[in-house]
Image (cartoon, helix red, strand yellow):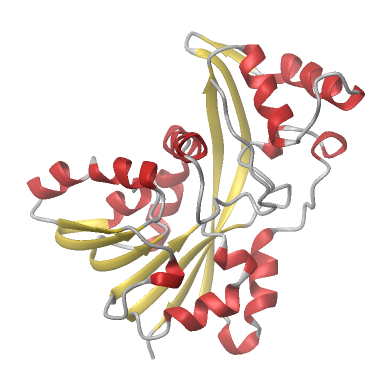
Amino acid sequence: MTVASFSEDTGVRPSRWDDGQARFYAETIESSDYVDRVAPLLGPPWKDFVDVGAGSGALGARLVGDGGRWTAVDPQPAMRALLERQRMPLSARGATLEIHACTWQDLPAHLSARRLLAANLGATHHEAGVFFDAMVGRWQDAMHWVVAAQAGPSSFCLAGFLPPELHGCDTRPAFERTLDQLGPERAPDDIRFADWHCRFVFADLPTAQAHFLDRLALAPDTAKAVAVCRFVARHALPTAAGIEVSCSKRSAVMRWQAH
C-alpha cells in the first residue's frame, strides 16, 4: 500500500487530498472508536443539518435521525464516493442525503440548516475566525465543531504512536489554538471532550514502517529513519489481519447555541 504524504500540521484533513490520502483517512476513522465516542456528545439524532467537510460520512450518518435531512459538503471525489454508500441505509429510514462538491469557501449562498457541523476541518484550526464568520447565517439552532484536543502531537493521524524525540511535533492541544483565533467574542457556549483511540491495521511491518517514514518525510537511510523503523517493529501489534498501530486521541466538541 502506498500512502501519499501531506504537510498539514494539525492532524486534520486539508480541503483537498488525492484519492489515496482520502481513503487512508477514512479507513483510519472508520476502524477507530472515534464515532462511538464523539457522536453521543452531539446529542440526540438531528433532523436537519449541514455537514461541512463531511468526509466519508462516518459521523454524519450516526447523527441523522429518521426522516432527517443531511446536507454533506466535501470537495474530495473519493470522500463523496464513500458518502454515496450512505444513501440506501438512509432511504430505508426515510432520511435524505444531499451532497455538494465544493469547499467551505464556495458554499452556495442559500445553503443553511437547523444545525451546522464541522468535524476535523483544517479551517477550524488555521482560519477559525474567518470560518466562523463565513458560517454566520447558515445555522438556526446550533453550530458544532469537533477539534483535536489531545495533549500530544496532531501532525498526522498516528503521530501519537511515536515518542516525542521521533515525531518532533508541537504537543500543545490544537483546540487551544482554535480558541486563541476565535477570541472571547466568538467563544463557544460549551466544550465537551471525548477520549478515543486512533487505530489502523497495515498489511505488514514494512508497510507500517514506510507509512511513518513518509509522514515524517524521512529518507530510509538516515539515523532517524532507522530509529523510527525500530520503534515501529518493537511496539506495533501483530494481529491476524496484519500489523496494528494505535494511539490515544481526544476531541473537543464545541457548541454555539442560538440565543
Left or right of residue 111, residue 120 in this image: right
Residue 158's place in the image compared with 53, above or below, is above
Single out the residue that lies furthest toward the right.
223
Identify the image quadrant of the C terminus: bottom left
User: Relative to residue 225, is residue 97 depicted above or below?
Assistant: below
**Which residue shows up at 57% across the image and 52% down it?**
12
Asked whether the viewer can see residue 101, the reply is yes
- Horizontal and vertical percent for residue 114? 27, 76
**Nearer to me, 244 or 55:** 55
Q: Is residue 144 left or right of residue 13?
A: left
Question: Of residues 19 and 53, which is closer to you in this image?
Answer: 19
Rendering coords of residue 209 (x, y %): 69, 20
Q: Is residue 30 above or below residue 15?
A: above
Question: Is 48 situated above or below 59?
Answer: below
At x 58%, y 81%, the residue is 187
Where does residue 117 sit, x and y in percent of width and height? 39, 65
Q: Is residue 222 left or right of residue 124?
A: right
Viewed as shown, does residue 93 lie left or right of 159?
A: left
Say which of 60 and 12 sits in front. Answer: 12
Which of the 4 image quadrants contains residue 252? Answer: bottom right
User: Which of the two residues, 257 or 102, is positioned nearer the viewer here?
Assistant: 102
Q: Is residue 189 visible?
A: no
Q: How many marks?
A: 0
- Whole-percent x and y of residue 95? 13, 56
Residue lying furthest top: 240
Q: Residue at x 61, y 72 (%)?
A: 127
